[in-house]
Amino acid sequence: MSKRHLAMTPTKLFGRLMEAMNAAAYREAIQGLPARGAVLEIGFGTGRFLEMLAASGSYALIAGIDPTPAMVAMAGARPALRQPGSQADIRLGTAESLPWGEATFDAVVAIHCFQFWSDPHAAVQEVRRVLKPGGLLRLVLRAHGAHPPDWLPNPISRAGDEDAGASALLSAAAFEAVLAGPGHRIDARKPA
């Protein structure tokens, strides 16, 4: 057995599977993002999307937050995010308590993690706080079908029709131009 196989822990195996399953969502999420500035990804998992942002070489800051220490370690091991001058800021934490200052980011992206926000109202207020005026929030939601699992922490996700519930939440939080896009994507802007 090779060293590569010995090093493949269940967490790494799950992470690689998650990357493969989310590949289309990553491509969808990166379309039309601001080409420069600062981007935050909430729930970055293995860090693949952050790595895609870093590959462009055009961002002043690429930040991410994830509640799982194993995912923080996996993302932190990606060479593109460890290089000197990469401007990557990867932290352990949750969407409900973002450790960055007001008006830090031009865009905030959350790919298939909205369902895990236990307090979506608090999380959206935090996102609004860290976004610059006119900044973009992009949610890429997972399709749960008519009967989402009861174990999901987000009450909006558990209620069914997550797209409509998330859109209503963003509108109630005074986001503008809340638009549903392809692939369960919702874009919203903080007022300028």
Image: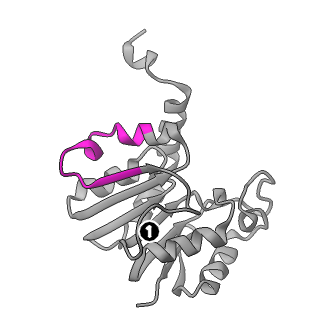
Residue at 38% x, 12% y: name it: 2
On screen, residue 73 above or below 64: above
In the picture, measured across the screen, residue 151 lies left or right of residue 73, that is right
Across and down, in percent, residue 187 comes to 49, 77
Left/right placement of residue 49 relative to residue 154 reads left
What is the three-letter code of the residue carrying label 1? Val
Residue at figure coordinates x 31%, y 58% from the top left: 53
Q: List x then y, in percent, for residue 77.
A: 35, 36
Q: Does the magenta segment cover residue 88?
A: yes
Q: Residue, x 27% and y 42% (percent of image)?
A: 82
Which residue sits at x=37%, y=58%?
Answer: 63
- Exactly how many numbered labels are in the figure? 1
Quarter containing the C terminus: bottom left
Task: Check the image and tell me how it is coloured.
Answer: one colour
Mark 1 — residue? 108
Q: Position of residue 179 (x, y in %)?
A: 53, 82
Q: Nearer the viewer, residue 26 or 88?
A: 88
Position of the N terminus, as image quadrant, is: top left
* Highlighted range, magenta: 73-90
Picture quadrant of residue 150: bottom right
Q: Nearer the viewer, residue 8 or 62?
A: 62
Relative height, residue 80 to residue 99 (above, below): above
Q: Residue furthest top?
A: 1
**Residue 68 occupies which quadrant of the picture?**
top right
- With respect to residue 135, does 72 lie above or below? above
